[in-house]
Each structure stands twice: as structure tokens, then as C-alpha cells.
């Protein structure tokens, strides 16, 4: 009888310890449960990129800026479902014929959007523009853009593209569901 009581107490303590653990402060919290799958995808992409933040000046403040953007209700209203956006060194006051000319030194834009089926045209119109890429998953569409400038860092762009593509594969089943 004592063994059973100790086992029950041990399980209660174990559950308490696990439930009291602090959440990872780097993770963005989903504003709605219907978006949990998208935020799991975004957070996995972010966690992989965060590993490179100290190595690349292009990624300065990536962790905090992307978490704040994902948790900003006003910013998320720009998307029908959800989007992740990060920029560094983008000159918003200067227009330019070439996108690259709108950046200061070590400038970068990373844009990741999940489009629902009714926004297929918007998704298609971005593919191939300023390094925009995309994948269709079920009826949903994933758009991603990684653009570095002054100088262009092809190595960083390739690494981030690989991270995004690996996470698209990892989350494909969840991202293909209608939201």
C-alpha cells in the first residue's frame, strides 16, 4: 500500500514540476487557437534562425523583433491568416528601381506568410519577385522571401531558405489543413 501512495505522490510532484516550468521566452504566443499550427511552424523556423543571430549582423535583434511582430495584433491584421516579418536596414523613405537600392549596409528582409485558398492570386503574384518563393500545401499556400543587401549574403539566404523548407516539410500536414 505504501508503494502505491509513494508512486501517486511521485506522479503528482512530477506533474507539478513539469507544469510549473517556465515557458521559452523566445517563443511567440498564438493569438487564437486556430492559428496554433501556424505559430508552431513560425516558432520552429525562428528557433533555427536564432541559432545564427550572433554570427550574422543581418539578424541583429531577430529574436525579439519577430516575437513582438507575431504577437502584435495590429501587425497580424495585415494578414488573413498570419505572417512573420523581419527587416533590418530597410530605408522606408527612399524609393528605388532595384529593391536592393532601398537598403542600408547589411540590410535584410525576411517575410513568411501562410495564405488561405482564397488568396492564391496574391500568393502567385509574389512568387519570383525580389527572391520570393512559395509552396502549396493542401489548399493553403506558403510564401517566403529572404533578401539581403549591401552586400548580398547568398550563404545566409541559402541557410534560411533551407531552414524554412525543412520546417515546411516538418509541419506540412498541419499547414495543409484549412484554418
Image (cartoon, rainbow, N blue to C red):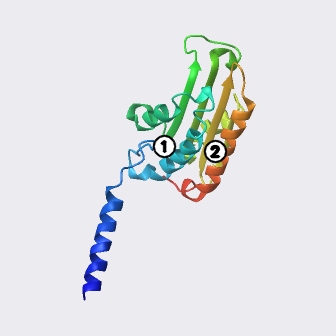
Q: Where is mark 2, residue-wise? A: 164
Quadrant occupied by the N terminus: bottom left
Q: Residue at left 62%, top 21%? A: 107
Residue 175 vertical position relative to residue 9 in the rendered view, above or below: above
Q: Nearer the viewer, residue 47 or 125?
A: 47
Residue 76 position in % (x across, y down): 44, 36
- Looking at marks 2 and 1 on the same chain, the residue that comes earlier in the sequence is marked by 1
Residue farthest toward the top in the current orientation of the protein: 94
Residue 28 position in % (x across, y down): 44, 42
Q: Residue at left 41%, top 38%? A: 71
Q: CA distance from mark 2 to mark 1?
A: 18 Å
152 sits to left or right of 176: right
49 sits to left or right of 133: left
Q: Residue at left 29%, top 85%? A: 3
Q: Nearer the viewer, residue 38 or 123?
A: 38
Residue 154 vertical position relative to residue 100 in the rendered view, above or below: below
- Which numbered circle lies on residue 81? 1
Would residue 162 be seen by someone viewing this image from the given angle? yes
**Label 2 packing within 10 angstroms: few (<14), some (14-19), many (20+):** many
Residue 17 vertical position relative to residue 108 in the rendered view, above or below: below
Q: Tag 1's secondary structure? A: loop
Residue 59 vertical position relative to residue 15 in the rendered view, above or below: above
2 or 1: mark nearer the eye? 2
- Which numbered circle lies on residue 18? none
106 sits to left or right of 115: right
Q: Tag 2's secondary structure? A: helix
Residue 82 position in % (x across, y down): 49, 41
**Label 1 packing within 10 angstroms: few (<14), some (14-19), many (20+):** some
Q: Residue at left 69%, top 44%? A: 162
Q: Nearer the viewer, residue 34 or 67?
A: 67
Residue 156 position in % (x across, y down): 69, 34
Amino acid at each position: 500500500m505504501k508503494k502505491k501512495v509513494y508512486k501517486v505522490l511521485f506522479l503528482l510532484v512530477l506533474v507539478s514540476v513539469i507544469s510549473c516550468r517556465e515557458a521559452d521566452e523566445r517563443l511567440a504566443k498564438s493569438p487564437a487557437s486556430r492559428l496554433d499550427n501556424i505559430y508552431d511552424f513560425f516558432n520552429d523556423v525562428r528557433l533555427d534562425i536564432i541559432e545564427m543571430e550572433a554570427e550574422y549582423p543581418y539578424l541583429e535583434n531577430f529574436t525579439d523583433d519577430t516575437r513582438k511582430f507575431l504577437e502584435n495584433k495590429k501587425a497580424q491584421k495585415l494578414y488573413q491568416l498570419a505572417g512573420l516579418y523581419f527587416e533590418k536596414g530597410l530605408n522606408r523613405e527612399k524609393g528605388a528601381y532595384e529593391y536592393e537600392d532601398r537598403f542600408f549596409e547589411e540590410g535584410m528582409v525576411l517575410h513568411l506568410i501562410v495564405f488561405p485558398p482564397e488568396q492564391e492570386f496574391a500568393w502567385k503574384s509574389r512568387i519570383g519577385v525580389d527572391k520570393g518563393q512559395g509552396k502549396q500545401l493542401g489548399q493553403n499556400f506558403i510564401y517566403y522571401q529572404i533578401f539581403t543587401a549591401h552586400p548580398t549574403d547568398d550563404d545566409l539566404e541559402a541557410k534560411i531558405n533551407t531552414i524554412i523548407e525543412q520546417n515546411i516539410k516538418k509541419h506540412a500536414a498541419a499547414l495543409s489543413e484549412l484554418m
